[in-house]
Amino acid sequence: MVQCVLLGLPGAGKGTQASSISSARELLHISTGDMFREAAAAGTELGLQAQEYMSRGDLVPDEVTIGMLLERISQPDAIAGFMLDGFPRTLPQASALDEALAAQGTEIDTVPYIRVPEELLMDRLTGRWSCPECSDIYHTVTRPPKVEQICDSCLSSLVQRADDQPDTVKARLDTNREWTESLAEYYESQGKLRLIDGTGAPEDITRRILETLDATG
Ligand code: AP5
Ligand code: MG
Ligand code: ZN
């Protein structure tokens, strides 16, 4: 069983990689961003509350986020292992996760940190199209769908995320830069951090992460 956290700035490729790796290793891919977007689309109170923060590029408060994630990893489909994408994003989230896992006698095994020079992230995010149904991720230049604006996997119409406008991307990078470094230090001090070069073809990055997971056992 593998319980892992994927770290990386907005646009680093967390969703792209978590999707490939969770299929390759039969892990459950859990993205708190996707969970908030689904809740917003369904119009739940949680979703509407989260949307306010997301549209500004701010973090959704820990009180909301921690409870939602801990509830998700307590579900039966998470027992065989999971890959967290976008959680934790603050130190209180990281310690809440550690405490919850310790209470069950488990822990996070490995934390691949996907690193991409910041100047590449704006183009990645402003060119992204996503599937609102199955969360598949595309890019106008680097990963175009077979049919324009249609998801290869489920044939739904692709959408651009509201927070992928250049101003909001800047705000998201500002919000996440320091927290991501703090989390990297936190997991480094636990001996769990693994630096992954996030440049190059997505398949090469997947291979790098899989090698890291295999080396951890
Ligand atoms: P979230 O949805 O997690 O967004 P994010 O962290 O900003 O990251 P992204 O999803 O934008 O990027 P990614 O790393 O997944 O990249 P992707 O693979 O798509 O969170 C959204 C919001 O929700 C947050 O801002 C916050 O408000 C809230 N939130 C979520 N979790 C929270 C938490 N724990 N606490 C508080 N608030 C929370 O790739 C990006 C693009 O690049 C795609 O087009 C892709 O095709 C392309 N690409 C990928 N890999 C490559 C490559 N190797 N080469 C070229 N292009 C590539
Ligand atoms: Mg993502
Ligand atoms: Zn789809």
Image (cartoon, helix red, strand yellow):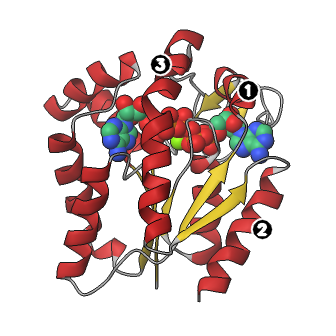
Quarter of the rendered image showing ligand 1 = top right
Horizontal side of residue 107 vs 213, given as left or right: left
Q: Residue at x 27, y 64 (%)?
A: 97
Q: Residue at x 31, y 84 (%)?
A: 106
* Residue 92 picture location, percent across and down: 24, 51
Asked whether 126 or 217 is in front, the reply is 217
- Residue type for callout 2: Arg
Task: Give the CA distance from mark 1 to mark 3.
Answer: 14 Å
- In the picture of the structure, the residue carrying the numbered disc 2 is 207
* Relative height, residue 107 to residue 72 (above, below): below
User: Please, what secondary structure does the residue beneath circle 3 have?
Assistant: helix
Give the mark nearer the N terminus: 3 vs 2.
Answer: 3
Residue type of the residue flagged with mark 3: Ala
The amino acid at mark 1 is Glu
User: Does the rendering let one see residue 169?
Assistant: yes
Quarter of the figure that contains the C terminus: bottom right
Q: Secondary structure at mark 2?
A: helix
Residue at which label 3 appears = 171
* Image coordinates for residue 83, horizontal then vertical, percent: 48, 65
Q: Residue at x 50, y 75 (%)?
A: 191
Secondary structure beneath dot 1 equals helix
Q: CA distance from mark 1 to mark 2?
A: 24 Å
Q: Which residue is mark 1?
A: 119
**Which residue is farthest top?**
167
Label 3, label 2: how far apart the Cα atoms are: 31 Å
Which residue is at the front of the view, 160 or 63? Answer: 63
Asked if residue 45 is positioned above or below residue 18 in the image, the reply reads above
The foreground one among 45 and 122 is: 122
Choose mark 1 or mark 2, whichever is in front: 1
Residue 81 figure quarter: bottom left
Sequence-earlier tag: 1 or 2: 1
Do tag 3 and tag 2 residues touch (Cβ < 8 Å)? no
